[in-house]
Amino acid sequence: MRRNTVLALVSWLMLLALFITTATASLPCRCCWLVQHPKVTCGHAYCGENCCPPTPPPSSR
């Protein structure tokens, strides 16, 4: 491919990623399932600030 085509494709993908992140940022809590996995923190890229608060450890129940 030509260099201009690659640059246009990369620019389009970056714009698409920006649109997706801004669109999902306004949605209600969609990342509650990530809390169930101890290796995934609440600040996941797809969650942003919309992640549910972490569930308490089983020992504190």
Image (spheres, rainbow, N blue to C red):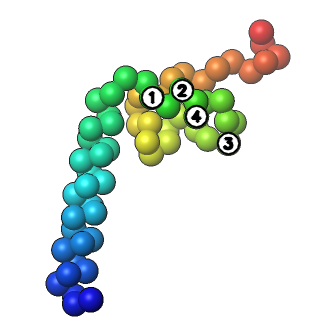
Identify the mark at residue 30; answer none if there is no mark. 1
Secondary structure at numbered mark 1: loop
Within 10 Å of disc 3 (Cα), the crowding (few <14, some 14-19, many 20+) is few
Within 10 Å of disc 4 (Cα), the crowding (few <14, some 14-19, many 20+) is some
Does the CB distance between marks 1 and 2 fall below 8 Å? yes
Amino acid beneath label 2: Cys
Residue bearing mark 4:
34
Q: Where on the picture, by quarter, is residue 12? A: bottom left
Does the CB distance between marks 2 and 4 fall below 8 Å? yes
Identify the mark at residue 39; answer none if there is no mark. 3
- Name the residue rendered at 74%, 21% in the picture: 57
Could you give the CA–CA distance between mark 4 and mark 3, rounded to whole angstroms? Answer: 9 Å
Q: Residue furthest front?
A: 1
Could you give the CA–CA distance between mark 1 and mark 3, rounded to whole angstroms? Answer: 18 Å
Residue bearing mark 2:
32
Could you give the CA–CA distance between mark 2 and mark 4, rounded to whole angstroms? Answer: 5 Å
Q: In this picture, is 12 found above or below 3?
A: above
Amino acid beneath label 3: Lys
Secondary structure at numbered mark 3: loop
Q: Residue furthest top?
A: 61
Secondary structure at numbered mark 4: helix
Within 10 Å of disc 1 (Cα), the crowding (few <14, some 14-19, many 20+) is some
Amino acid beneath label 4: Leu
Q: Where on the picture, by quarter, is residue 11? A: bottom left
Does the CB distance between marks 4 and 1 fall below 8 Å? no
Secondary structure at numbered mark 2: helix
Among numbered discs 2 and 3, the one appearing first in the sequence: 2
- Name the residue rendered at 67%, 42% in the picture: 39
Q: Where on the picture, by quarter, is residue 25? A: top left
